[in-house]
């Protein structure tokens, strides 16, 4: 993968509750069919969505944000980075953008953030699509627990040792399938002195106790929800996808991407974009009361897709 494929435009900055947030907007050349908001997880930034965002922005206005503590947003130690705080920020950011029921797409802990903004803070979505989402127990590796137990030790690691740890951690999410250049792009925000402290601070702040109240309310979600997963996800096993699907409203089948690990937007951007294009097209038809959609809109997506995308998927979407 070329590193320019993960680039985004220069960000704008928004201050929410004292925290400076890097935001990005990709506009279509013609009229926009709607607004899509993409949420990243940990230890990532909006760059994991860059290729998918460019594809979606052919027809929709696409909004991205780096959560405080990540990417090009503030890494100041005074800005909390726990999941409940990030959920509140997302709700306020959507209000700042003036978005009325946007389409939300979220990956990893970004799913917990999006669900919290909706269920706890009243953000309304046209629909929600969750990729390899961290919501249900169990989650959090022994590494997370080790950092939480020794919050003052890891920030003092020698820079070279810290850099090796971060690169190995990042690479492991894809089962070491990402090339070195892409791994470096994902690791780069964490490698200077500020980034090193921020890396371990956000790890220590991520607690399953913060997702349990959201998980307990999944049946209260007020929009259609889609679920996608890498069939070989080493961090959040694909078995969780069916459990999550069963707890959410609706019956759209889980989309599993064969040969893909945890970083579907980077490992299989075409397949992810194809899935989302179909999902958004169906959602727009449903929202406008399209008669043809009412007659033919039964979920028809294949249960498994090859990482290359389109050939494994019906053009009519879910």
Image (spheres, rainbow, N blue to C red):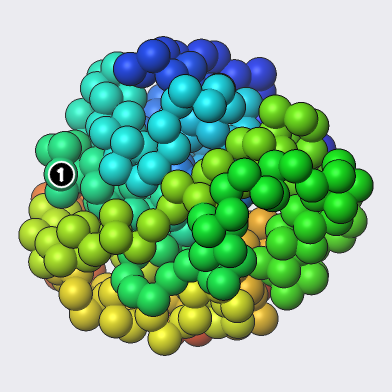
Vertical order, 112 against 97 (above or below): below
Q: Residue at x 39, y 42 (%)?
A: 82
Q: Residue at x 55, y 23 (%)?
A: 76
Tell me where residue 167 appears, x and y as whole percent: 80, 56
Q: Residue at x 32, y 71 (%)?
A: 136
Tell me where residue 139 appears, x and y as whole percent: 43, 71
Q: Residue at x 41, y 63 (%)?
A: 134
**Label 1: element kind:** loop
Tell me: 113 left or right of 258: left
Q: Quadrant of residue 249?
A: bottom left
Q: Quadrant of residue 70?
A: top right
Mark 1 is surrounded, within 10 Å at the Cα level, by few (under 14), some (14 to 19) or many (20 or more) other residues, namely some
Q: Nearer the viewer, residue 252 or 156?
A: 156
Q: Nearer the viewer, residue 225 or 117?
A: 117
Vertical order, 316 against 64 (above or below): below
Tell me where residue 294 appears, x and y as whole percent: 14, 64
Tell me: 33 left or right of 198: left
Q: Nearer the viewer, residue 296 or 239?
A: 239
* Residue named by callout 1: 120
Vertical order, 109 against 237 (above or below): above
Q: Nearer the viewer, residue 177 or 164?
A: 164
Tell me where residue 98 appears, x and y as whole percent: 26, 19
Residue 308 can be seen in this image = no
């Amino acid at each position: 993968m070329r590193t320019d494929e993960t680039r985004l435009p220069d960000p704008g900055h928004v201050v929410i509750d004292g925290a400076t947030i890097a935001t990005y907007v990709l506009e279509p050349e013609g009229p926009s069919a709607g607004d899509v908001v993409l949420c990243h997880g940990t230890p990532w930034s909006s760059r994991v969505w860059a290729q998918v965002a460019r594809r979606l922005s052919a027809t929709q206005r696409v909004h991205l944000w780096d959560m405080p503590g990540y990417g090009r947003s503030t890494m100041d130690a005074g800005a909390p980075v726990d999941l409940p705080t990030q959920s509140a920020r997302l709700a306020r950011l959507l209000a700042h953008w003036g978005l009325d029921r946007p389409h939300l797409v979220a990956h990893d802990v970004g799913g917990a953030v999006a669900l919290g903004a909706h269920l706890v803070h009243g953000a309304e979505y046209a629909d929600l699509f969750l990729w390899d989402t961290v919501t249900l127990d169990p989650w959090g590796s022994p590494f997370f627990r080790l950092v939480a137990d020794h919050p003052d030790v890891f920030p003092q690691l020698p820079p070279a040792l810290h850099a090796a740890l971060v690169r190995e951690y990042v690479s492991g999410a894809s089962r070491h399938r990402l090339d070195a250049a892409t791994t470096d792009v994902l690791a780069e925000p964490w490698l200077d002195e500020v980034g090193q402290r921020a890396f371990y601070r956000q790890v220590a702040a991520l607690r399953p106790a913060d997702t349990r109240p959201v998980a307990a309310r999944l049946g209260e979600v007020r929009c259609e929800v889609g679920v996608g997963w890498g069939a070989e996800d080493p961090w959040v096993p694909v078995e969780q996808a069916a459990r999550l699907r069963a707890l959410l409203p609706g019956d759209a089948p889980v989309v599993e991407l064969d040969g893909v690990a945890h970083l579907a937007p980077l490992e299989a951007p075409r397949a992810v974009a194809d899935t989302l294009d179909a999902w958004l097209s169906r959602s727009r038809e449903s929202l406008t009361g399209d008669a043809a959609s009412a007659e033919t809109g039964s979920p028809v997506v294949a249960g498994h897709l090859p990482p290359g995308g389109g050939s494994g998927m019906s053009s009519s979407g879910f």
